[in-house]
């Protein structure tokens, strides 16, 4: 029997766990975190390492600890450059080491349970959670902290191609793609956001003059992925007064600088293009087909391109994660949901 159970041990799940421990809401032996990976924040580390991220997109006050300036204070023991730009965006190395220190400090791994949740229901006022390992536990409180990062967005034109490491097409965040070094050039990266940009920069080091960035739009430059005003009353006061959840979702979508990159990443791409190490194409694929050992892309502009490898940096599906247990839980507990499919929580996040 646990006081708190958290489904999902990524950045947000670990942030919640750390808060519960440090605020005295619970103790480590009364907390359970269920996650399919062996270690806390494992998926985050794997994906950010794959694309060669050097600095985070978010400012230094965004981290898993309780004190807003915890990351900055932690950085004082480092001698190398830890932050970038006006908003002090932390290096990935610093961010990860800070996470490690918090995880070790609160003994978070003592509460770790590797597995996938397959069923959740309420039983005599307690939450009963079952995993694919055959384990069944009870908890007074339940936090759902799952992500959409297993719902890869595949463009329509790519769905009929042989997607996977054995073929010529792969999503950058696919579990089957373990290393960019083994790709066959020429390579095209499809996407115009920060993931595509990081991936292209890394590929240019591996395969100079054999990399193309294919984006539907001109490169959009924004330092952060949303205006800092959303952190406080500047925008949140007005947003909190909106009662229509459809309008709320529209506001959130509009507030995000989707498919954008910070200035220093933009400058790197332009430099690579001027050096002819990288080719940037602004177009959209209309049709893709297998052509001998390559893939032929027919663009909407009427032009064509042949590539050995296509990497999709097209993000994730933004709808409710396709978890059968979650849909069943929503139905059984009659949870009120918005049009986007997500449950509407109270002021107490219940």
Image (cartoon, grey):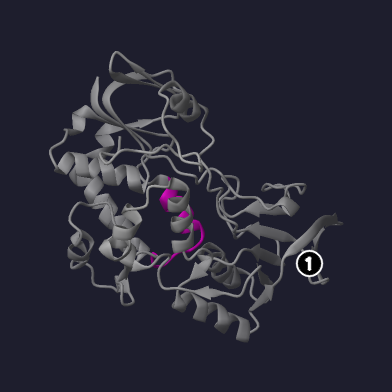
Is residue 347 visible in the rendered image? The answer is yes
Name the residue tied to disc 1.
299
* Figure quadrant of the C terminus: top left
Comparing 256 with 55, the one in front is 256
State which region is magenta: 43-56
Residue 108: x %, y % from top left: 25, 39
Give the side of residue 85 with respect to residue 194, left or right.
left
Q: Please check the rendered image and state whether residue 46 is part of the magenta-colored stretch, yes or no.
A: yes
Give the side of residue 236 with respect to residue 272, left or right.
left
Dividing the picture into quarters, in which one does residue 205 lie?
A: bottom right
Dividing the picture into quarters, in which one does residue 297 lie?
A: bottom right
The residue at the point 43 percent across, 52 percent down is 248
The answer to whether 29 is drawn above or below residue 305 in the figure is above
The residue at the point 76 percent across, 49 percent down is 161
Residue 142: x %, y % from top left: 31, 30
Comparing 235 with 259, the one in front is 235
Figure label count? 1
Give the side of residue 7 with respect to residue 164, left or right.
left
* Figure quadrant of the N terminus: top left
Looking at the image, the residue that sits furthest to the right is 292
Residue 319: x %, y % from top left: 53, 44
Is residue 183 visible in the rendered image? The answer is no
The answer to whether 250 is drawn above or below residue 29 in the figure is below
Looking at the image, the residue that sits furthest to the top is 124
Comparing 333 with 47, the one in front is 333
Q: Please check the rendered image and state whether residue 193 is part of the magenta-colored stretch, yes or no.
A: no
Residue 84: x %, y % from top left: 34, 74
Looking at the image, the residue that sits furthest to the left is 24
């Amino acid at each position: 029997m646990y006081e708190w159970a958290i489904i999902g041990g990524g950045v947000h799940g670990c942030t919640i766990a750390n808060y519960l421990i440090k605020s005295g809401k619970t103790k480590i032996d009364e907390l359970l975190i269920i996650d399919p990976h062996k270690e806390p924040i494992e998926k985050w580390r794997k994906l950010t390492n794959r694309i060669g991220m050097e600095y985070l997109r978010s400012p230094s006050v965004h981290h898993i600890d309780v004190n807003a300036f915890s990351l900055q204070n932690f950085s004082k023991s480092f001698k190398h450059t830890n932050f970038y730009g006006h908003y002090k965006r932390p290096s990935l190395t610093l961010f990860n080491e800070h996470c490690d220190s918090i995880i070790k400090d609160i003994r978070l791994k003592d509460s770790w349970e590797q597995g996938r949740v397959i069923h959740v229901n309420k039983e005599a006022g307690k939450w009963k959670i079952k995993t694919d390992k055959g384990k069944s536990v009870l908890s007074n409180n339940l936090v759902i902290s799952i992500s959409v990062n297993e719902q890869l967005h595949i463009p329509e034109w790519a769905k009929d191609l042989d997607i996977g490491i054995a073929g010529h097409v792969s999503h950058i965040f696919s579990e089957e793609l373990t290393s960019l070094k083994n790709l066959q050039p020429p390579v095209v990266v499809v996407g115009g956001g920060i993931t595509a940009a990081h991936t292209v920069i890394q590929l240019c080091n591996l395969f100079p003059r054999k990399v193309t960035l294919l984006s539907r739009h001109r490169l959009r430059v924004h330092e952060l992925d949303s205006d800092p005003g959303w952190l406080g009353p500047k925008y949140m006061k007005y947003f909190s007064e909106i009662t229509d959840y459809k309008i709320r979702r529209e506001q959130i979508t509009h507030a995000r600088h989707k498919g954008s990159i910070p200035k220093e990443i933009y400058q790197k791409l332009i430099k690579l293009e001027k050096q002819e190490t990288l080719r940037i194409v602004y177009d959209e694929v209309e049709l893709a087909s297998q052509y001998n050992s390559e893939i032929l892309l027919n663009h909407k502009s009427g032009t064509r391109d042949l590539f050995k490898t296509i990497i999709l940096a097209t993000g994730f599906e933004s709808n409710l994660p396709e978890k059968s247990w979650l849909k069943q839980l929503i139905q059984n507990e009659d949870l009120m949901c918005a049009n986007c499919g997500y449950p509407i929580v109270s002021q107490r996040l219940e």
